[in-house]
Every structure is written in structure tokens, then in C-alpha cells.
Amino acid sequence: MHLFYKAVPPYNTDFQGTLKPENRTEAALLKMNTSVSVGDHLVFNILIFFPVKSLLRFRCVCKRWRCMISDPSFVEAHQSRSATTLLVSSFDDRSHDRKRTLYTINPSINEGEVRCLSEFCNWSISRSVNGLVCIYEQYPAESHRVRLFNPSTREYVNLPPPIFSGRDSSKQVYNLGFDPSTKTYKILRSWIGNWSDCTYEIFTLGSDSLWRIVKDNPKVVLDTKGDCLNGTIYWPKDIGIQNRTIIMAFNVGEEKFRSIPAPPTDPMWDFKTSRMIQMGGHIAIVDYQEVAGRISNVMIIWKLEDSLNGIWSHKRILLPESLMQRIPRHASFCVTSLDGGEIALIPSKLFKDRYVVYYNLEKERTRREVLSWLFRNMWHISSPYAYCDDVCVYVESLISLKEITCVCRTFEGENQAVGMTYSYS
């Protein structure tokens, strides 16, 4: 298993190797470090408010700062204060292979700062855990490459090929999980041989060298992406024969499945008009069927209050009439949640004005951010045939994949350090 690291961006230095500040805040901080003696505690409490991009540069200031920024306590404190970013997957419907592109949207910046991840063409995304994402290649059909990726530092690690493979890589879904009791990351793969059969494989970062088959098979085909919360991955699943919906849960530590009753009045699950999200430390389902059908402006959110007993609460949201006028009939959205109690809705069909709708649950206010001016040089996204087919939200994180995958087993069963290859943009 090889670890590839990509810096974002290369350190900005002059010909003498001195770090050059990119803004006034960085300049003031660097001047403070060189002109006065400042205690580590004060520096710690200042640096945790800087974005990852700046902190990667600050590691070059001195050894003291490098050690501090790399310390696990700093990484954890910084992550708890970091802003969230949207990672969006889109494809061009004109191409025969539906060429897929990944890009990020920073909702904290006015009109949303957009950055295209052009090096990851035709890669799909899982839901994010602690700022990390599992990405896997969909095309070409014979490809089964999968990586653990930190979009903030652009560091990624290639995983070994899965057990089951075939020419149709679209019959696979990867989910990233985290066991907080052991601080272990695992990747769960659903391999769908046919519509009535599904095999589950699992890979533990830092200990496994090969994928393992999950012994506890729920006999349910989980062909959608799940959300990991508090050591459990959740999926909504419709049982067509029984005409009902259930919630499937996978305990990452115990590697066992179980089912949870769905909301009592929830209709049959429709992935085109319903989405599962995380909200306030709970799993929730956003149902916008009436909005998509232009029946009403009501959107319903079901929140799982008690996962053991299947107790749900619900909230009705009224979207502004001005927004409803812009939504075509039978529209679908990619939905996720942000810090501060906001829900983000991105139209699956990227319309001419390309926008993201943010709804604040506490203030009951809607804001609409137009992104069109940011797509001038992104032909693959600005195309009228471009679709947004998936979105996840991640928190900026300094987590190093070297720490997660520092030791692995070789195919012969011996332990060795992970080999590392470095490249810089």
C-alpha cells in the first residue's frame, strides 16, 4: 500500500527560502513570531483558528510550530473549530461514460468559493468522517481503484484491490466508517452481483493488508451511500415486496448489521426525492417529494432521536415561494447539512444560474448563493448537460494519513512500514 502526498499549494517562498505571507493576517502572525517571544499556549490558541492551507505553510516557519501543528491535540482542537466545505460530484450527460468531476464549494465565502479537483476524474465519493473521504474510480469499467482521501491537505492513500471484481464497477458502493472506541477507520464495500445478492467486504486502515468478507450478511442489498455517526453507518432501504422502508445500521467496531424501524408515516423510500443526512448529532431523513412535484413548498425532516428503540421526531419546513418558482417539476436535489444548523440543497440538474440553497433551521431563513461566475473556465461543469449527482460535507482537517496507515501487513503476513511516494503540484 503506497501513500501519495500532494501539497496545496506549494509553499510560497522567496529565493532565499523565506516564507512569504499571503495576506495581512499571516504577515502580522509571522512578524509576531520573529519580533517577540510568545508562549506556546498563546500561539496554540491563535493558530487553531487558521485554515488548513495556512497551517500547512506555517509548518515551515520553525520546528516549534511544525511540532505543534502536527500534534494530535492541536489537530483535534483545530478540527472542532474548522469550517465545513461541500464536496460535489457532477457528470456530463452528453458523454457515453458520463465523465465525472469533483469540486469543492466553500459556503463560508460570499458566493461560494469553488475549486475543481481535476486530478480526480471519474471518481465517486463516500460520506465524510472526520474530514476524510473514501473515493473510488468508476471508469474505466475494469478499474477498481479505491483511496482514502483528505481533501483539505490533498493527501491520499491507495488501498489494495477488493476481493470481488468484474467489468461493471458501477455495481459497488464504498462507505467510510470510524470506531471512536479504538479510533480505527474502516471501509465497507457493497459488491452487488445481481439485484438479489450482495456481498460485503471490509478493510481496516492500519492493520489489514487485504479485504475481508463481513461474516454478518444482512441479506439486504445496500446500494446507496451510508452516513457514519458515533461508530455506526446508517442506510435507508425500501423493502419492495413488503411495501415498507427500514433503516439499516452497521456497527463499525463489532462489524454487525441490524435494522431500525423507519418513521411511522414515512412513505416508500425514493432516493430521487429523499436524502439521509446528519443533523445536530442525529441521523435525519429529508423528504422533499412535494417540493419536487411542485405540489407544495413543504419539506419534512425526520430526526432519529433514539436509534435503539426507533423513536423519530419530525419538522415541517416551508420553502419561500420565490424559490419554488425557479424549481422545475420533478426536480431532484443533492442534500446535506452544514455547521450552524443549515441544510444545503443543490439542484441535481445544474441550471443556468447554478445555485445552492441554504436553509437555517433555527432562524427559519433561506439564502440562495449563485455560483455561475465561478464556472467560466470549467467547461465540464458549466455545460448545460452537467448534473450534480452526489454531495458530501467535510470539515477541514489536519489528520495525517501517515498516522492512520503507519503500519500494514504485507501479503506474506509480515509487518512493514507503508512506502511513501511524494509529489507536489
Image: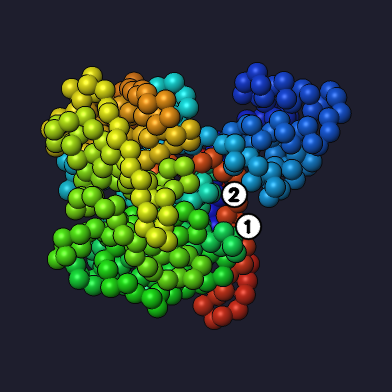
Q: Looking at the picture, does residue 307 appear above or below residue 277?
A: below
Q: Position of residue 351 (x, y in %)?
A: 22, 28
Say which of 78 and 284 sits in front: 284
Q: Position of residue 377 (x, y in %)?
A: 34, 27
Residue type for callout 2: Ile
Q: Looking at the picture, does residue 266 appear above or below residue 84?
A: below
Question: Which residue is most to the right?
Answer: 37
Residue at point 17% right, 31% down?
296
Q: Looking at the picture, does residue 92 appear above or below residue 35?
A: below
Dot 2: element? loop
For label 1, count other residues whose C-alpha is less than 10 Å away and answer few (under 14), some (14-19) or many (20+). Answer: few
For label 2, count other residues whose C-alpha is less than 10 Å away and answer few (under 14), some (14-19) or many (20+). Answer: many
User: Is residue 177 rendered to the left or right of residue 295?
Assistant: right
Can residue 411 be seen here? yes
User: Is residue 235 rendered to the left or right of residue 44?
Assistant: left
Disc marking residue 403 = 1
Residue at point 51% right, 67% down?
253
Residue at point 74% right, 36% down?
44
Which residue is the site of mark 2? 399
Q: Position of residue 32 (x, y in %)?
A: 78, 24
Residue at point 20% right, 25% down?
324
User: Is residue 24 rendered to the left or right of residue 228?
Assistant: right
Q: Looking at the picture, does residue 392 appear above or below residue 177?
A: above
Dot 1: element? helix
Say which of 421 and 381 sits in front: 381
Q: Are marks 2 and 1 in contact (CB under 8 Å)?
A: yes
